[in-house]
Amino acid sequence: MLIPHSKPLMQGKFLARYDRFIARVALDGIEVDAHCVNTGRMEGLIQPGCRAWVSKVDDDSPRKLRYTLELLEIDGITIGVNSILPNRLAEAVVKSRLIKGMKRYRKLSSEVPYGERSRVDLMLEGANRRHWIEVKNCHLVYPDGGAYFPDSISKRATGHLEELAEKVKQGDKASVLFVVQRRDGDFIRPSALHDPVFSQAATDARRAGVQFLGIQFDPGVDGHRYLGTLPVDTRPYPVEQIRHFRDAHAHNSGWKRRGKVS
């Protein structure tokens, strides 16, 4: 199953990331600023000189940044870095009824209010109960084969787990659906190294009945090809097993300060 990009992609060379939301990319020798949708540190992905692909906004758009950073190629692996896209990818796979436990439903809705000032990404309505689904983007894969989320502290994500557990308590189903936008991950883990509170909350949520599942894609110029599901391991583990992986990424993460775009 191939999910096409909504706009054509242009290939260039990644140069730098500034002020979190700006990526400098060279397109045919001309340097342009692209919107970096991912708000996290993008651990290990900030590698000047790597291949990059951007999309261009419509000509009549008032947006100041005319391009959006979509893909990066690191060590031969193409990685989707648009952190808004996973909701669209997840919805397409669920609509195709390719995920066990998410096939039998009558209605699919998105951005449905729940909890305290939150909106769930997807909600399935069946004959007897509803199924609440939070979608999480996962781009960080370590040499142990694990895809880790998050790559920095995320109080918002922890809050989502607590709200999903409450839905289970009320008699509904609830799931966390991780979307891995790269082909080299073998399993998914909540990162106790980057956010121990979220990691513990994931363990607690699973015990409360929240389901955890991952889906994997191989991004390309034509779109994201669906590869299948990945298991999610929420069991505790020694963080020292992965600390040296994070340390090795220290110089290829985060962003530089530059100031406002002129």
Image (cartoon, helix red, strand yellow):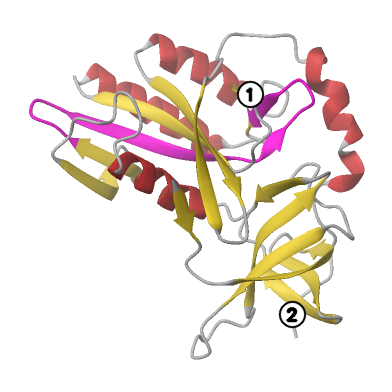
Residue 103 image position (x, y, % from top left):
25, 31
**Residue 145 horizontal side relative to residue 9, left or right:** right
Residue 139: in magenta span: yes
Q: Mark 1 points at which residue?
A: 186
Give the class, few, some or many, for how many residues have Cα within 10 Å of label 1's Cα (few <14, many ≥20).
some
Give, as a three-letter code, the residue at label 1: Asp
Give whichever of discs 1 and 2 has the lower sequence position: 1
223 versus 126 height, above or below: below
Q: Is residue 41 visible to us here?
A: no
Query: Which residue range is magenta in the image?
Result: 125-148
| Residue 207, numbered circle | none
102 versus 85 height, above or below: above
Residue 6 image position (x, y, % from top left):
47, 67
The residue positioned farthest toward the left in the image shown? 127
Q: Name the residue under label 2.
A: 261
Residue lying at 86% horizontally and 38% vertically, measured from the top left: 249
Give the class, few, some or many, for how many residues have Cα within 10 Å of label 2's Cα (few <14, many ≥20).
few
Please name whichever residue, 76 or 231, is drawn nearer the observer in this view of the structure.
Answer: 76
Quadrant containing the N terminus is: top left
Residue 244: in magenta span: no
Q: Is residue 142 visible to us here?
A: yes
237 versus 196 height, above or below: above
Distance from Cα at disc 1 to Cα at disc 2: 39 Å
Please name whichever residue, 72 or 128, is drawn nearer the observer in this view of the structure.
Answer: 72
